[in-house]
Amino acid sequence: MNGGAVDVLVVGAGPVGLTAAVELRRRGVSCRIVDRLPARLPYAKAVGIQPRTLELWDRMGLVADALDAAVPLRGQLVYVDGEEREPLRLALPPEVPYGFAALPQYETERILEAFLARFGTSIERDTELVSFAQDEEGVSVLLTGRDGEEELRTRYLVGCDGAHSTVRKGLGLTFEGGAFPEEYMLADVETDWDLPYGYTLRAVHHDADGRTDDVLVCIPLPGPGRYRMSMLVPPELSVSAAPAAGDGVAHGLEGSRAPALADIQRVLDRMAPRPVTASAMRWSSVFRISHRLVDRYSEGRVFVAGDAAHIHPPTGAQGMNTGIQDAWNLAWKLALAVGGSAAPGLLASYDAERRPVGEEVVGRTVRHARRTAGAAADQGTAAVLREAQLLVGYPDSPVVVRPSPGEADGSGPGPGERAPDCGGLAGEVPAYPLRLHDLLRDREHVLLVYTDGAWDSYVPRLAALTGGLPAGRLTAYAVLTEGGSAYAGATPMPVYRDARGEFALRYGVRAPTAFVVRPDGYLGARLCPPAAEGLAGYLAGVFA
């Protein structure tokens, strides 16, 4: 059966694939998303939601749904050999709009799937990618599903199909790395203890030689007393003799054995800091951990993201959140390519930007996992910001405009860095001050011109450049300095006054400056002085 043609086929309907599909559909791209599973799995696998992910969900317009379903993560209680240690506090600077949160993966998928349905797209379940072949014009795909085989033609193929990715194998990508010898049990249970609300628990025990011989990690979930727990597997439940998958990757849940509630309770009896009884177990499993990274994130018209590109220990809840950012980075670029508006090197920047991030995350989580159990965790502001994924950036990207010598105008974020939020933006119509992220929400590229009101010089020239782009691809705002003179009459772009000086503080500006904020919330350019030539240079690297 021939299935016609589509702009993008997304393989895999986990959080990463759903994010890619949502971001494509929000931009009007025709997209199908398929998954080999018949239904969403009820497992709380990936639980931690980073502040950076919440910022992206804010920009998408679905953060309220996530906040309604999530619980806060405020820190971690630490016990070593039965002794309480200094807890880890997840404290962020006050200008960061969201904190850390916990949300079961099945809830994350539910929210994303419901949001995707608003754009008329649903997951095609029980549907598996069999093979594909690409040429200069597109990708020919063979699917198999409930109604048999289907031949499909798509312009681009995105593999979000996990650690055993068919797309990755079909591209012939290497997936170098290794596996940890330890096996773990996972369980989703209710408890009757009174631990502080919003805190995770980590308890470790050492043998006489100082080696870790027992571990208990508990992460709160929505619901009274409910936690996702992980612990070392006892010998009688070990599946170490079980072979890895056919691709040699030993990673993820093992379906052959499921621990009983009594197995979980025995660990709690040994390791919990106070007496506790577990009950109402929703699910359990044994799982193994590998660390691997592909040699490249794309080949021609085919791309990989999330676990299909990088797998690593769950330390710090980096995996799913990194994959969501993969999908965001790729989707806005694919949308421009589908519309014929992408510059020739734009799609290649996906690998150039995201693979170094994957490499850093894999390396960091492996180092943390191998660190002596119970060692004090980094608690400085920079360490917490890194765990929150707020320090991810692309300063060496081929599609950001680096300032020329002498152009630096302050200490704020530079090209390729995250665009921070700030408050106190006063407009003439709103009766209340806005956040900068309010202006960025549901926008593509945004030009911010920090100005003292000198409209007759650079502002009209910058505004004129935005008119040559496809409709909706760039929105321009002027941010007027605290002491700047208001312009009497019509303005070439909406004006907001930096009423509390927060924009100047967060962006480190002391003189008129133009910023280009990309659709994924990173600065594509920082121009001081705000010359039209600099803006034109950035736009030429992104838009055809």
Image: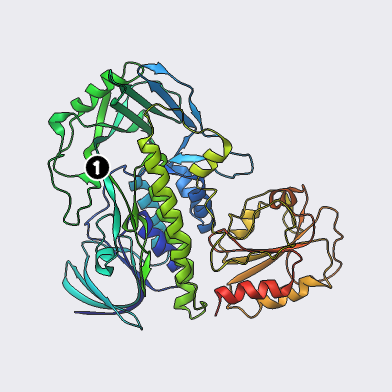
Task: Return the x and y of residue 349 as percentages of the image width and height.
Answer: 48, 68
Residue pictured at 77% horizontal, 48% vertical: 501
Q: Is residue 42 visible?
A: no
Locate residue 459 relative to residue 413 in the image: left or right: right
- Report the colour scheme: rainbow
The C terminus - image quarter: bottom right
Q: Nearer the viewer, residue 360 or 440?
A: 360
For the point 51% across and 45% down, the residue is 51
Query: If the image is split into quadrants, where does the N terminus sit?
Result: bottom left
- Residue 411 as seen in the image, left or right of residue 238: right
What x and y, as percent, mark residue 380?
56, 34
Task: Tell me where residue 396 appears, x and y as whole percent.
Answer: 55, 61
Asked if residue 538 is positioned above or below residue 406 in the image, the reply reads below
- Which residue was labeled with disc 1? 288
- Residue 478 vs 335, above or below: the answer is above
Callout count: 1
Q: Is residue 464 left or right of residue 441?
A: right
Residue 262 in sight from this viewpoint: yes
Tell which residue pokes out farthest to the bottom in this image. 137
Q: Amino acid at mark 1?
A: Arg
* Residue in view at x 21 percent, y 38 percent: 286
Q: Determine whether the residue tagged by mark 1 lies in a helix, strand or loop.
A: strand
Q: Residues within 10 Å of mark 1 (few under 14, many from 20)?
A: many
Q: Residue furthest front?
A: 209
x 42%, y 66%: residue: 119
Q: Quadrant of residue 462?
A: bottom right
The correct choice, above or below, for 363 with respect to 13 in the image is above
On the image, the x and y values in percent for residue 428 come to 77, 59
